[in-house]
């Protein structure tokens, strides 16, 4: 999104010329993903714990699993946001490979959400 919006302005503001280099956009997207995960991660984890969204650990299961009690599930939301938002900001969205990657990531995130939702809310 930023790529398409700002690249035409490179003739008026020369530092925007950096946007044409994939290495600059990749590094910017990586930093944006890091900052997004640091910013929204604790907030989402707090909300998941507040609403007690987590898997129940069976007492008959392995003893090592008992340490996972209270760990919130659906943390993939953080990963999904940290991948999709920087991609939308810094990638060339007209590239077919980017479109396929976004579709695959969102699709797999939806499957993960559905799996966690059915486990936690519906107790399936």
Image (cartoon, rainbow, N blue to C red):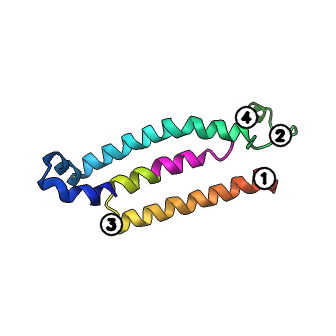
Q: Nearer the viewer, mark 2 or mark 4?
A: 4
Cβ–Cβ under 8 Å for marks 1 and 2: no
In the image, is 28 to the left or to the right of 7? Answer: right
Query: Which of marks 1 and 4 precedes in the sequence?
Result: 4
- Whole-angstrom CA distance, mark 4 to mark 1, is 18 Å
The spot of residue 25 in percent (x, y) is 29, 49
Q: Quadrant of residue 63?
A: top right
Residue drawn at the location 18% of the way across and 56% of the way down: 9
Give the residues drawn in magenta, as a range.
Answer: 70-83
Residue drawn at the location 57% of the way across and 57% of the way down: 109
In the image, is 62 to the left or to the right of 2? Answer: right
The spot of residue 20 in percent (x, y) is 21, 54
Q: Tell me if mark 4 has few (under 14), some (14-19) or many (20+) residues whose alpha carbon lies within 10 angstroms of its own.
A: few
User: Which label belongs to residue 38?
Assistant: none
Establish if 76 lies above or below 105: above
| Residue at image mark 4 | 68
Label 2 sits on a secondary structure element that is loop
Residue drawn at the location 49% of the way across and 35% of the way down: 38
| Residue at image mark 3 | 95
Label 4 sits on a secondary structure element that is helix
The spot of residue 41 in percent (x, y) is 55, 38
Cβ–Cβ under 8 Å for marks 4 and 1: no
Label 1 sits on a secondary structure element that is loop
- Whole-angstrom CA distance, mark 1 to mark 2, is 21 Å
| Residue at image mark 2 | 61
Query: Which of marks 4 and 3 precedes in the sequence?
Result: 4
């Amino acid at each position: 999104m930023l790529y398409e919006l700002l690249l035409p302005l490179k003739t008026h503001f020369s530092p925007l010329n950096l946007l044409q280099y994939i290495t600059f956009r990749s590094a910017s997207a990586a930093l944006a993903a890091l900052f997004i995960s640091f910013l929204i991660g604790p907030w989402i984890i707090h909300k998941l714990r507040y609403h007690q969204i987590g898997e129940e650990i069976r007492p008959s299961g392995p003893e090592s699993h008992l340490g996972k009690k209270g760990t919130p599930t659906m943390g993939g939301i953080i990963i999904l946001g940290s991948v999709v938002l920087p991609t939308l900001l810094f990638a060339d969205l007209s590239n077919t490979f980017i479109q396929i990657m976004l579709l695959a990531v969102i699709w797999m995130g939806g499957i993960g959400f559905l799996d966690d939702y059915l486990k936690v809310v519906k107790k399936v």
